[in-house]
Image (cartoon, grey):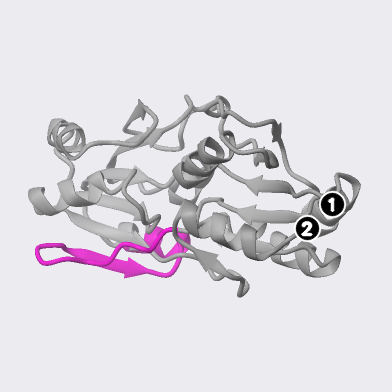
Amino acid sequence: MSKNLLILGGTTEATALCTHLAGTDLRATLSFAGRVERPRRQPLPQRIGGFGGAVGLADYIKNETITHVIDATHPFAAQMSNNAVTACAQTGTPLIALTRAPWEPMSGDNWIQVADMTSAATKLAMLPGQNIMLAVGRMHLGEFAGLDQHSYLLRLVDPPQTPPPFARFHAEISRGPFTHADDLTLMQRHNITVVVSKNAGGTGAYSKISAARELGAQVIMIDRPEIAPRPEVHSVPAVMDWLNAHPA
């Protein structure tokens, strides 16, 4: 039986894996959750949308004769990752996660580390009026509604379909990876004093953290959610080694 891979994607790591797999004879399908309106085209067959929870994912694995699942989702896509652990356990399908190491504070950083979005909003509520770079994605903007003492710089992949819930904001529509120089200029232009960020890890979104360090801005860093234990690797070659060690 030949390998038939399902890649749960949406990250730069998934893009790198797809680019590599396109040069092999392995069958693979890339799945996007559908939260981005204009996902970047990939050199592999794609599907967009959820599976219907762990049960739906298990059905998809069986119906499409998937032999291996590679979870290359965002570190904060905990529900999808947990569903993958459950569905692969139910179907006996090998699973590997292609992840990135979390960021760690460095000399010169001014971080407040919090457990989740609610805790980040609580920290903002305690601050007098600031210029906030709110880099948490459009799905989470509502969790910061009502904190109108602040002005907000919102960085979004897609234009918001409904007005963000803030009295004063500027939406910057752009797609990473970003550079330190560009983020430094952007943050200076908006006089940013506080950055709210998920601890995404990797290099593609780190520039706002290094720019905050240079500007002396405070960073409210949101810890990653808990995900069920699963094997993890941090590079495309490691994924390929794993595939070679797990025949169909």
Q: Magenta segment: does it hold 114? A: yes
| Above/below status of 124 relative to 64 | below
Residue 30 rendering spot, x and y as whole percentages: 65, 39
Q: Nearer the viewer, residue 19 or 48?
A: 19
Query: What span is in magenta?
Result: 100-123
At mark 1, the secondary structure is loop
Q: Which residue is mark 1?
A: 1
Q: Earlier in the sequence, mark 2 or mark 1?
A: 1
Tell me residue 203's x, y (percent).
31, 48
Category of crowding for the residue at label 1, using alpha-carbon neighbours closer than 10 angstroms: few (below 14), some (14–19), many (at least 20):
few
* Closer to the camera in the image, 112 or 33: 33
Question: On the image, numbered disc 2 is attached to which residue?
Answer: 248
Tell me: 162 left or right of 191: right
128 or 12: nearer the eye? 12
> Which percent across, then down, holds residue 125?
33, 58
Q: Residue at x 19, y 32 (%)?
A: 182
How far separated are the C-alphas under marks 2 and 1?
A: 6 Å
- Residue at 45% across, 60% down: 234
Amino acid, disc 2? Ala
Question: Does 185 appear in magenta?
Answer: no
Q: Is residue 107 left or right of residue 83?
A: left
Q: How many other residues sit within 10 Å of disc 2, few (<14), some (14-19) or many (≥20)?
A: some
- CB atoms at circles 2 and 1 under 8 Å apart? yes
